[in-house]
Image (cartoon, coloured by chain):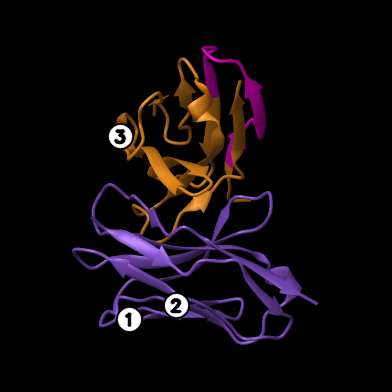
């Protein structure tokens, strides 16, 4: 089944403790992207990647890192999480830069206390 | 900058009622337009898309027509079901290689039996 898999689905952590949210797709898509969803603010892009070793900042990159060492994986790294990073995170992938539509993962609900 | 504006929700309808969710956009070029749906506890799913003016996207009884003259992409369905209850997002992508989806705020639809 074609899908984007994110892990974990739920995570509660403490301020400053490094964490990684994994994202993997099995569709050989070139484009991958991370979004966060917050009440009243909607969905905002954090980082995106057009291909292996090619990444760039989205609208809200502060406090996040990404890497794209393999085509299928695009992990999101929070080096020192803070409470304002409490959010619902989505990974998404697309074959054609998004114009054909993105496939989204099921989401990761992160709480930083 | 580029943006998407959706009608505010929640929208509450009875089963078999007609649905319209308004969406207008602002863009400097010629975007591709999308409707995504988010069911409770799940990620976003592509519902339909249109890539150029006068295109009509359709899926699962939902339709939307790309109207360049009014910069609109309103979502319609002739007869809603309880299972259509979800959050609906209008979004655009500019033809560039960032692949960034720009989302509207989302409209919550509740269908009552």
B48 to the left or right of B55: right
Q: Chain of mark 3?
A: A
Range drawn in magenta: A5-20
Cα separation between marks 1 and 3: 31 Å
The residue indicated by pointer 3 is A57
Of residues A23 and B67, the one nearer the viewer is B67
Is A19 magenta? The answer is: yes
User: Residue A34 got which mark?
Assistant: none
The residue indicated by pointer 2 is B74
Of residues B9 and A75, the one nearer the viewer is B9
Residues indicated by labels 1 and 3 sit on the same polypeptide chain = no
Q: Which class describes the residues within 10 Å of circle 3: few (<14), some (14-19), or many (20+)? A: some
Cα separation between marks 3 and 2: 31 Å
Q: Which class describes the residues within 10 Å of circle 1: few (<14), some (14-19), or many (20+)? A: some
Q: Earlier in the sequence, mark 1 or mark 2?
A: 1
Residue plotted at (42% across, 35% down): A71
Q: Is residue B83 above or below residue A77?
A: below
The residue indicated by pointer 1 is B67
Q: Chain of mark 2?
A: B
Is A72 magenta? The answer is: no
Residue plotted at (47% across, 70% down): B7
Residue that lies at the very extreme toward the right in this rendered image: B113
User: How many numbered discs, if any?
Assistant: 3
Instruction: Say which element carries label 3.
Output: strand
B21 to the left or right of B11: left
| Circles 1 and 3: CB atoms closer than 8 Å | no
Please identify which colour was used for chain B in the image.
Answer: purple
Please identify which colour was used for chain A in the image.
Answer: orange
Q: Chain of mark 1?
A: B
């Amino acid at each position: 089944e074609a899908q984007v898999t994110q892990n974990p689905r739920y995570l509660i952590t403490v301020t400053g403790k490094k964490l990684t949210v994994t994202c993997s797709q099995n569709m050989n898509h070139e484009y991958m992207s991370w979004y966060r969803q917050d009440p009243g603010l909607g969905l905002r892009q954090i980082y995106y990647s057009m291909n292996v070793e090619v990444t760039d900042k989205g609208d809200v990159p502060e406090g996040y890192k990404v890497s794209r060492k393999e085509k299928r994986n695009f992990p999101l790294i929070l080096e020192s999480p803070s409470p304002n990073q409490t959010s619902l995170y989505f990974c998404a992938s697309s074959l054609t830069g998004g114009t054909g539509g993105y496939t989204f993962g099921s989401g990761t609900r992160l709480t930083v206390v | 900058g580029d943006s998407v504006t959706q009608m505010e929700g929640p929208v509450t309808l009875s089963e078999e009622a007609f649905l319209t969710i308004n969406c207008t956009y602002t863009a400097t070029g010629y975007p591709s337009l999308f409707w995504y749906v988010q069911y409770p506890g799940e990620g976003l799913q592509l519902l339909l898309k249109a890539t150029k003016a006068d295109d009509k996207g359709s899926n699962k009884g939902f339709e939307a027509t790309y109207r360049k003259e009014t910069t609109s992409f309103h979502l319609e369905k002739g007869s809603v079901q309880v299972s259509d209850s979800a959050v609906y997002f209008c979004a655009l992508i500019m033809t560039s290689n960032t692949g960034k989806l720009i989302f509207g705020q989302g409209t919550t639809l509740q269908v009552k039996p």
